[in-house]
Image: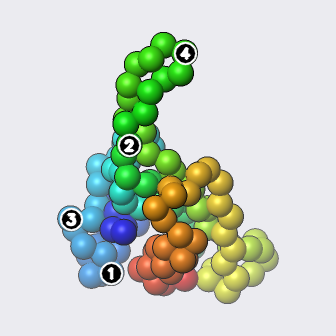
Amino acid sequence: MKVKWERNNRALDLAAQGKIKDEDILPRSRTDEFPAGMATVRMQRLSDNVPHVVVHIRGKSKQKQNVWNGNAYESAQTCRVTLAIASYGQAAGQSFGMSSNGELDEDLTWQDVHNIVTEVKEAMGV
C-alpha cells in the first residue's frame, strides 16, 4: 500500500531531505477526501519535536447501498492509527506509542498496518 503525506512544512521538509517523494505529498483536504487504497499521513502540532501523527489507512472504495433510502454511494473502510510519544517526560523518539480506531478493510491485515507505521516512523526518524 502506498503512503501519501498531507501537505505541510514537515512533509515538504521530508521531501527536501529525500526521505519521501514529492509526488507522495497531497494537497490539504478533508479526511473523507483522502484517496482510497492508500495510507495518508496527517500531522498536527508541527512545532513539537515529534508532531502528533494520524495515519489514515483506507481500503479499496466499494459501492454500497443506503438501507433507508436505497441510494448507492462509494465508501472505503478506514483504520486510523495515532502515533504519539508515549510519555511527555521522555526525549523525542525515545518511546513511541500508537493506538488505532475505525475499521480495517477486510483486504488488509495488521501486518500491513505494521509495515505502513514502520515506513512512516522511518521517514520521520522516530
Q: Residues within 10 Å of mark 3 (few under 14, many from 20)?
A: few
Distance between the Cα atoms at labels 2 and 4?
Answer: 18 Å
| Quadrant occupied by the N terminus | bottom left
Q: Is residue 26 left or right of residue 68?
A: left
Question: Closer to the N terminus: mark 3 or mark 2?
Answer: 3
**As drawn, 70 above or below 121:** above
| Quadrant occupied by the C terminus | bottom right
In the picture, the disc for residue 62 is 2
Q: Nearer the viewer, mark 2 or mark 1?
A: 2
Residue lying at 46% horizontally and 83% vertically, measured from the top left = 122
Question: Closer to the N terminus: mark 2 or mark 4?
Answer: 2
Question: Closer to the N terminus: mark 1 or mark 4?
Answer: 1
Distance between the Cα atoms at labels 1 and 4?
Answer: 47 Å
At label 1, the amino acid type is Lys
Q: Which residue is mark 3?
A: 23
> Please, what secondary structure does the residue beneath circle 2 have?
strand
Q: Which residue is mark 4?
A: 68
Q: Which residue is mark 1?
A: 19
Q: Residues within 10 Å of mark 2 (few under 14, many from 20)?
A: few
Q: Nearer the viewer, mark 3 or mark 2?
A: 2
Count of picture labels:
4
**As drawn, 38 above or below 74:** below
